[in-house]
Amino acid sequence: MTDVAWKRFKFFDIEQVRNDSVQTITTKDVMCAASGGGFLFFGDAQGGISVVSRGFSVHRFQAFNQRCNHLYQTKKGRVLVAIGDAIEHRGFEEIQESQHAAKVNRELMNKKMG
């Protein structure tokens, strides 16, 4: 039987990052994440999206009034798709009318299909 010698590969140098050189994401409630185009995107429970560059600079913007549920970065990295919760601006009567119209439309579609 031959002896197998393990070869050690050095992929990167270990270097501790100083706290003052890296900005931090201020929220603790990260709900979703995406990456692409050299950036990391984090959606939080307050409706904000934090953008982290390769140089670890962090920028945050408010996308929704409540939480950010899903993030998706397109293949070419030029479009970020975000789905989140916002406050309903319609009144109660408008919501009822909209739900009734949707119900009538479903019934009509079911009649045509069946």
Image (spheres, rainbow, N blue to C red):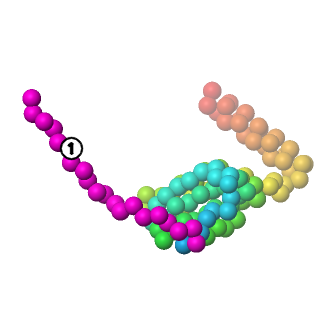
Which span is picked out in magenta?
1-20
**Which residue does the image show at 76% across and 37% down from the upper left?**
103
Residue 15 magenta: yes
**Which residue does the image show at 28% across and 57% down from the upper left?**
10
Report the side of 49 relative to 11 (left or right). right
Q: Which residue is mark 1?
A: 6
> What's the magenta bit mostly, secondary-structure-wise?
loop
**Which residue does the image show at 80% across and 46% down from the upper left?**
98
**Which residue does the image show at 75% across and 55% down from the upper left?**
66
In front: 35, or 73? 35
Q: Give the quadrant of residue 82.
A: bottom right
Q: Give the quadrant of residue 114.
A: top right
Q: Secondary structure at mark 1?
A: loop
Locate the N terminus and report the quarter of the image it occupies: top left
In front: 17, or 28? 17
In front: 18, or 56? 18
Residue 18 magenta: yes
